[in-house]
Image: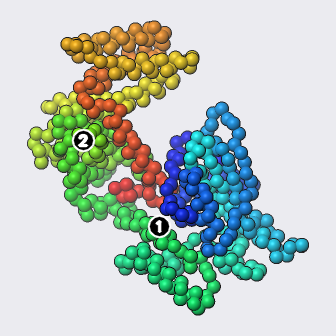
Amino acid sequence: MPRRKEDPIVPQSPPLGPISFEDLVWKQGARKGYGNKTTIMRAYIPFDRVGDFLRGQTCEGGIEVGWNVAERIQGTHVLRPQVDSYIEHVYYECPFGPKDLRGDPPHPHSKKRGCLARFSIKQLLLRPDVAEVAYYQVDHNREDGTPAHGLEDKDSIGRKSAYQPRMSLELKKWIKTRLSEGFTAKQVYEEHRRNWIERRKMKCPEIRDDFVELRDIAYYESRLKMGVWRRHPNDFESVKMWIKEHPENVFMWHEKDDVTDLPFILGIQTPWQKEMMLKYGHNGAIAMDATFGTNVPKYPLYSLLVFDHWRNGIHVAWVLSSRSSEEDLVMWLEPLRRHLEGTRLDFLPSCFIVDDAVEQRNALKRAWPESEVPIYLCAFHVLKNWKNHIWTKVPNLGSLRELVYRQLHSLLYMPIEYQETEEDFLKRARVRSKNMFNFLYIKSMEEYIEVYYDHQEMYLIGHRRNPHSNQDTQASIESYHAALKRWMKIDNHQLRGRRMDSLV
């Protein structure tokens, strides 16, 4: 199935040993297969754990039910491999299907009972260390929806299989009750084992619940804890309840008001984060960036970062706002400044590092008007924008693009000569950039540099004044936002990644 290029490929790390269906978090999607459009469940695991996954599916229910290899496809050589290109694609099907041969001669008691359960394992070409596992049908049912085999199949002939894909609802209720009473997962598992021994002495038939392990109970416990953040069915009411429970972690809170046209603003800063911002943000660099797509209302999430003595990034504040205009940014930047000056009156950062967002720069100037704190552009974003413009404006002639990027990279890291003023340095940099593109005969790139020459002081001078203004500033926030989105959007069928209270 072709996937979008922006779909993240993040392999999961299930516990050691056989990997069961419950050990993985699955993402649902649509796929065309077997003559009709079906829904699949997809997950990514390390390729060296494929054997553990097959053993986990084989030993489900405590009975050896081996999966048959239905088809094995070798990947072909492609000039431009896509994210779904593969080295090898293996399809597995349940041995009880997919054909239904019950009662047909010469084998009236055939094992083929019409079970449509099947999955596939694909070794990705771009990520050979990652395997994509796709379940086309999890339930062991026939085409009409009836169980094909197991205890629920009343038409089984001979010994009935104890296979059942997941824990029963009764066992889940019992585990939830025990966990709510204060028992640990290990204590619940030991009690379950004692009950299993008693049932075995009474010669009761084996079921899937008899083979539940400690990891199954621990995983179910972690799933139950995920519902703790949902305090109210309404998202905004749940956030307000969280604010009442943790007032010490909120420096700014304003509910959206359509009458007065005021935006929704929630500023979060824990006491420890405030201490770190006062310690490393005073006379130090503060980086600020925003990301989108972390919640259903599509409110941008602003993150503020300071750097310790080892130049490691420390997140010191998060702000959720329904709007991102200059006026709205000032509405929470000024309370943040007063919140810090309430503890330290002389708090003043040495500079701010942002991307090329005009509203952020203007809002910071208005929040700190009298101090004239310099605002610099992050070198990470400068190089990123240069790469994008080189790709679109420079023709692909040999190594021309690489040559242009090297010239611009040398311009960014051009040293200041001895006893040279900053004004003379900027003039020398401008002459060098113009001569560079006159020599290469790239008019479009020369016009781009000429238009944005006024910003050169924000990254050429700032890159030399401030030791923190390197690729580790905004890149630290970018990597944090990327990891946050991956965690929030593991499963689209859960509330994670949809509600704001889960993000908070």
Residue at 77%, 80% in the rendered image: 157
Q: Quadrant of residue 82?
A: top right
Residue at 14%, 40% in the rendered image: 347
Mark 1, secondary structure of its residue: helix
Residue at 56%, 47% in the rendered image: 129
Figure label count:
2
- Disc marking residue 308: 2
Label 1 vs label 2: CA separation? 37 Å
Q: Is residue 42 left or right of residue 351?
A: right
Tag 2: amino acid: Asp
Of pointers 1 and 2, the one earlier in the residue sequence = 1
What percent of the width, then of the height, locates residue 294? 41, 49
- Disc marking residue 219: 1
Q: Is residue 455 above or below residue 243?
A: above
What percent of the width, then of the height, locates residue 111? 78, 71
Q: Nearer the viewer, residue 14 or 478?
A: 14
